[in-house]
Every structure is written in C-alpha cells, then in structure tokens.
Image (cartoon, rainbow, N blue to C red):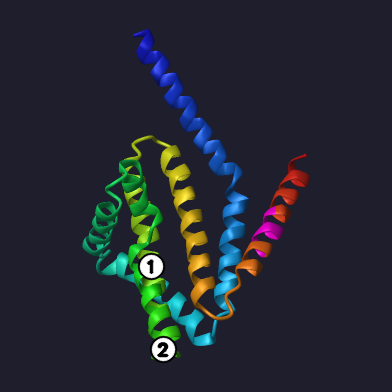
Amino acid sequence: MAQKAGFDFRSGFLSLLKFVVFIAIIPFIAAVTISFQREVYELKYAYHHSFYFGVITYVLLNLFLTDLNWLYKFGQSVSVEFFRFWDPLSKVIPYVLPIYTLVLIGAYYITTQILGQFVNSPFWFFMIGLTFAMHIIMAARELYESDRALFKPNYLFEMTLVYIVNILLMVQLLNATALHFSLFAFVQTAVDLTQNFYRVMYLRFF
C-alpha cells in the first residue's frame, strides 16, 4: 500500500509540474503563433490567403463532413515505419513530423524552384495549410483522448511541445523554400513578443 501511495504522489507531482509549465509558457506559445502568422502574411497575397483558406477548409471538413482520420493514420504509420530503427523516436515522430506537409513542401520546391513550373499556383499553399491543420488537430485529438486525468496535464504539456516543434519546423521549411519568409524576422518577433508578454505579466502581478 505504501508503494502505491508513493507512486500516486509522484504521478500527481509530475502532473502538477506539467500543468504549471504549460501555464508558464503560454506567453511564449502566443508569441510564436503571432510571429508565425505575421511571416505567413508576408508571403504573396495569393499564397498567404491560400494557406489560411486551406486551414479553414480542413476545420470545416473536420466539423461537418470528415476528419480524414484514415489519411492521418496512414501518414503516421509511414512515419513509424521509417523511424522503426529507434523505438523511442518512432513513438514521438508521428506527432512532431507533419509528413504530408513535408512532402508537399518538398514537391513545391522541386516543381517551382528547380523545374520552374506552376510558380504562381496557389494550390501548393492551400494544400500545405490544409495538411498542416489536419496534423495539428488530429495530433491534439489523439493526445487528448490518451490522457485520462481530469485536468489533462499530460495533454496540455505534450501538445504544447508538439505545437511549438511543428511551428518551428514549418518556419524552417518555409524559410528554405518560400520567398519573403524570413527566419530572422520570425525569431526576432517571437523574442520581442515573449519578453513583452512576460514583462506585462510581471508588472501586473508583482
């Protein structure tokens, strides 16, 4: 009985710690999100509108027609098989690697930058936005359903990490393939906003 109580105490402490960490980094999450949106908006008019239209399209599909879970699961299985050589990585990679978005960005780069075809087509960014939204939303659903705790501390902590890693990955990919997307500007904006958010919180509570 003592061993069980000790285990429950450790589990409860870790859950509380994860929840506290999540609360503490909310300003950073907000800063990263705003910075990413600003840089996407700096893309060509047709590109950034297509990206957001892709995101909205998936949200509406998820709400009213289909969540495309079968497609998401297939992408996850491909990621797991590819990284099966290292079991811990194969369990994490399906959440932090938006496989369809990665393939689309690769195809976009090859088609437009190397072959010089469909350079001004908004189709690429529509599909990038749609697949990226699918990955984030479906990953969030899986992590939420796997956490049985009342306040979902594991979900909040894990999804925060997944979200941040996915945004940073998208920033790096778009910086390498899309014109007018600046990694430096993203980092600078994110740092400035994070500092401002924490400064406001400090002055408000202390």
Question: Between disc 1 and disc 2, whose residue precedes?
Answer: 1
Q: Which residue is mark 1?
A: 102
- Whole-angstrom CA distance, mark 1 to mark 2, is 18 Å
* Secondary structure found at label 2: loop
* 80 inside magenta stretch: no
Q: Position of residue 92 (x, y in %)?
A: 36, 47
**Tag 1 near tag 2, CB within 8 Å:** no
Q: Is residue 152 left or right of residue 35?
A: left
- Indicate whether residue 192 is drawn in magenta: yes
Compared across the picture, whether 71 is left or right of 143 comes to: left
Indicate the secondary structure of the residue bearing disc 1. Answer: helix
Q: Position of residue 179 (x, y in %)?
A: 55, 81
Can residue 122 be seen at all in this image of the molecule? no
Amino acid at pointer 2: Ser
Q: Position of residue 55 (x, y in %)?
A: 41, 71
Residue at x 50% of width, y 36% of height: 18
From the viewer's perspective, is residue 188 above or below residue 119? above
Which of 11/204 is in front? 11
Residue 54 location in percent, x, y?
39, 75
- What secondary structure is the magenta-colored segment mainly? helix
Please indicate, yes or no, whether residue 146 appears anywhere in the rendered image.
Answer: yes
Screen quadrant of the C terminus:
top right
Residue type at mark 1: give it. Leu
The answer to which quarter of the image holds residue 196 is: bottom right
Residue ID at (62%, 66%): 186
Q: Quadrant of the N terminus?
A: top left
Rendered residue at 28%/68% (across/down): 64
Give the magenta part as a residue range: 189-194
The residue under label 2 is: 121
Is 155 placed above or below 44 here? above
